[in-house]
Amino acid sequence: MADQSIPQARTPEAAAGAPGAAPSPAADGISRRRLLGTAGATGLVLGAAGAAAGYAAAPTGATPLTSLGAEQVMFHGKHQPGITTPMQSCGHLVAFDLKPGAGRREAAALLRRWSDTARRLMAGEPAGSRDTDVARDAGPSSLTVTFGFGHSFFGRTGLEQQRPASLDPLPDFSSDHLDKARSNGDLWVQIGANDSLVAFHALRAIQKDAGSAARVRWQMNGFNRAPGATAHPMTTRNLMGQVDGTRNPRPGEADFDERIFVPATGGKDPAWMANGSYVVVRRIRMLLDDWEKLSGTEQEAVIGRRKSDGAPLSGGGETTEMDLEKTDADGNLVVPINAHARITRPDQNGGAAMLRRPFSYHDGFDADGVPDAGLLFICWQADPLRGFVPVQRKLDRGDALSAFIRHEASGLFAVPGGAAEGEYVGQRLLES
């Protein structure tokens, strides 16, 4: 876990109708688009208002529930959806392995099917002639579907020469307790939406589309705070009760694209990865029984930020720059040397930065009543060797939070750029 998380708000690009998002669909034709009353128009008005506020920490608390279903994200664009899209309230992560005998041709046909299904569902349309009607009567609900390729995919499809060097397996970390059955995979799909039925509908459609080409390797479910749940825009909290996401890089910052997306030309990556990104996925269990034994002051010392508002212990508000040298009356550092927020600062890691877009998860309780809960950590970067790896190595050497978390699953995937009109995701790789 790093001290970064993508804010929950419409991006300026989304409100302006730039690639990656669009106004809500017209309420005609298909049942899922027949939204209640003037919900579509309401969504447009609120979207415009959100643009004026910029890239805020959370959706406006004034958003009527009837407008949530009207929000639509575009499938086609420069980048795949689900990267800079504001965090949704529910999500599914699923990895697939190609079945024996399935190769490049079958993979291409699968990505073509998946892309068509994603395009339909993100527009609020049925998945196809065999739609399950799970999401009938709902709008798009900010649905996004994102696709990526794992290291093993290239060997199974005879495309080893096209495998990016940045996709080399992550190094081992001493704090890892990884379950190989729930790690990696040939193909990876991220689904997010602001309605649970819409998200499940997409998950089921993607799984059915896999057919004889691929089988599910692992699948995880997550959630976030629902849009409009707070009285005013604010950064989200994780299951430890901490404000989580203050220092996430934001679209519009001068070096955002350089840090998050593979350049279209001139980089070390193969041409098919232009405008794509690399995603690290980690299932991080929070040892909540141990964490909750700490006092509030002790918890704040572990993180380095106030629990109430996310402000650094050195003073100020949530976005105030942390003073790493400030000491108390006894000469002790106000922000402890092993505080999580201190260790993860980009200026303490050679400028390493990643765009975190996680989901919380809860998978029930064990026989002793211990919750199996934590974070589905998802971070995006142009190069994982410059983003995730150096930060995690430093955390591995002395992060105070390490005693209260356990990394139980891991994966690294190459996520190509967005599909243009008439294309499917990964076409430039599979038909090269």
Image (spheres, rainbow, N blue to C red):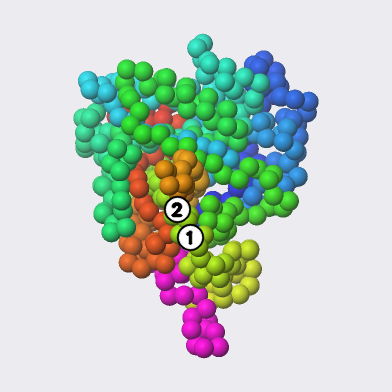
Give how far across and how far down residue 312 sits, in percent: 56, 70
* Residue nearest the viewer, comparing 305 with 187: 305
* Residue nearest the viewer, comparing 217 with 245: 217
Inspect the image, locate mark 2, and give the three-letter code of the amino acid beneath it: Met
| x 65%, y 34%: residue | 71
**Residue beneath disc 2:** 286
- For marks 2 and 1, the one nearer the N-term is 2
- Which of the 4 image quarters holds residue 321? bottom right
**Residue beneath disc 1:** 291
Give the prevailing secondary structure in the magenta stretch.
Answer: loop
| x 73%, y 41%: residue | 63
Inspect the image, locate mark 1, and give the three-letter code of the amino acid beneath it: Trp
Magenta range: 326-351
- Which of the 4 image quarters holds residue 161? top left
- The reply to whether dot 2 and dot 1 touch (C-beta < 8 Å) is yes
Give how far across and how far down residue 152 sits, in percent: 25, 36
* Residue nearest the viewer, comparing 223 with 85: 223
Q: Secondary structure under badge 1?
A: helix
Q: Residue furthest top?
A: 129
| x 65%, y 54%: residue | 234
Give how far across and how far down residue 73 sits, in percent: 58, 34
* Residue nearest the viewer, comparing 131 with 225: 225
Give how far across and how far down residue 38 sits, in percent: 78, 28
Q: Is residue 350 above or below residue 416?
A: below
Near mark 2 (Cα within 10 A), the count class, few <14, some 14-19 or many ≥20, is many
Image quadrant occupied by the C terminus: top left
